[in-house]
Image: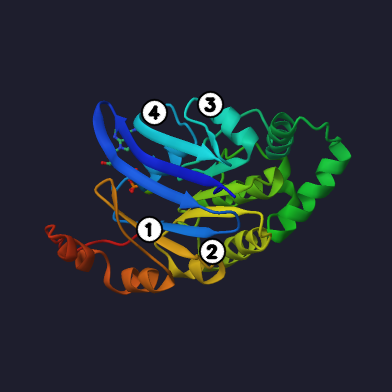
């Protein structure tokens, strides 16, 4: 059986500057992978290229989903296949409520006709899981939302759209302890369905305690320089990246900030 996601020799440029320099990544069905690396390594670039964000130019390599080459697929087409990405900085959209936005997106992606009543009921359950007030559904998307409300909104979108491959880009940044716990549990619960796969970008061990990754990949300067299992995550959390730089003969970074 083919992997759910296969990225092969992926090179990506922004404004003619090569940011990703030949990435290989395979994610099987039911697997959870964590992507770690210092700021500016290219982690968001990788996730956004897999989602076909037009800011990023795929200059070389291939991306396969369920065995099919999706190099030429638009963001919308990839979403329809079941690929999902949360953003570090979600967009604000005045004039459309959270509920309308989510229902419209779900109808567009699935082609199903979902009644307002049925959708309301489904949404209510997901909002309860995330400890979101029912009034949240009526508010304009992300407008005046706190950081925590925006982040929870992204996870709510994941629950509603029910993708096969979930990419989470720092889903825990800017959240307080309680919100991190709620988000972590919601994601872990979603991934308890072994047909789902996940690529999570995070530095925080709290979320990784719930969302137990099977594999870790360390990205430095646009290259995956190390791979391993949970023991690698632990070591990076304890020691940062300098020991890896040392192994590679790269210059160490002083006062490294792990955010
Ligand atoms: N839209 C963009 N325009 C110009 N440079 C960018 C853009 N997005 C990312 N970069 C550059 O690409 C590199 C990797 O960024 P990013 O993928 O956001 O890193 P990470 O998520 O690992 O912190 C950085 O040097 C960053 O400045
Ligand atoms: Mg990033």
CA gap between label 2 and label 1 equals: 22 Å
CB of residue at label 4: within 8 Å of ligand 1?
A: yes
Q: Identify which residue, 148 or 7, lies in the foreground.
A: 7
Residue 111: give x, y in percent of width and height: 76, 30
CA gap between label 1 and label 4 equals: 24 Å
The residue identified by callout 1 is 217
Q: Earlier in the sequence, mark 1 or mark 3?
A: 3
CA gap between label 3 and label 2 equals: 32 Å
Q: In the image, what residue occupies the spot 43% across and 26% down? A: 54
Residue 180 disc label = 2
Residue 93 in sight: no
Q: Earlier in the sequence, mark 3 or mark 2?
A: 3
Disc number lying in front (4 or 3): 3
Q: In the image, what residue occupies the spot 83% across and 31% down? A: 113
79 relative position to 27: left or right? right
Residue 55 disc label = 4
62 relative position to 107: left or right? left
Quarter of the rendered structure image containing ligand 1: top left
CB within 8 Å, label 2 to label 1 = no
């Amino acid at each position: 059986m083919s992997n759910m996601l296969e990225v092969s020799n992926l090179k990506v440029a922004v404004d003619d500057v090569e940011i990703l320099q030949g990435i290989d990544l395979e994610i099987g069905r039911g697997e959870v992978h964590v992507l770690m690396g210092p700021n500016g390594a290219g982690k968001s670039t990788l996730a956004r290229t897999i989602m076909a964000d037009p800011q990023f130019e795929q200059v070389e390599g291939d991306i396969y989903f369920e065995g099919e080459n999706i190099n030429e697929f638009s963001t919308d087409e990839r979403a329809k296949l079941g690929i999902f990405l949360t953003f570090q900085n979600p967009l604000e959209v005045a004039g459309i409520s959270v509920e309308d936005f989510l229902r419209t997106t779900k109808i567009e992606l699935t082609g199903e006709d979902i009644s307002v009543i049925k959708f309301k009921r489904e949404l209510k359950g997901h909002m309860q899981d995330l400890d979101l007030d029912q009034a949240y559904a009526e508010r304009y998307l992300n407008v005046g939302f706190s950081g925590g409300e925006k982040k929870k909104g992204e996870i709510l979108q994941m629950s509603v759209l029910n993708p096969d491959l979930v990419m989470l880009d720092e889903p825990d940044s800017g959240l307080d302890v309680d919100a991190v716990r709620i988000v972590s549990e919601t994601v872990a619960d979603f991934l308890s369905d072994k047909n789902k796969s996940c690529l999570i970008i995070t530095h925080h061990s709290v979320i990784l305690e719930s969302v137990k990754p099977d594999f870790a990949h360390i990205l430095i300067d646009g290259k995956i320089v190390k791979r391993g299992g949970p023991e690698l995550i632990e070591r990076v959390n304890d020691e940062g990246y300098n020991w890896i730089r040392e192994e590679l003969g790269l210059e160490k970074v002083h006062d490294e900030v792990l955010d």
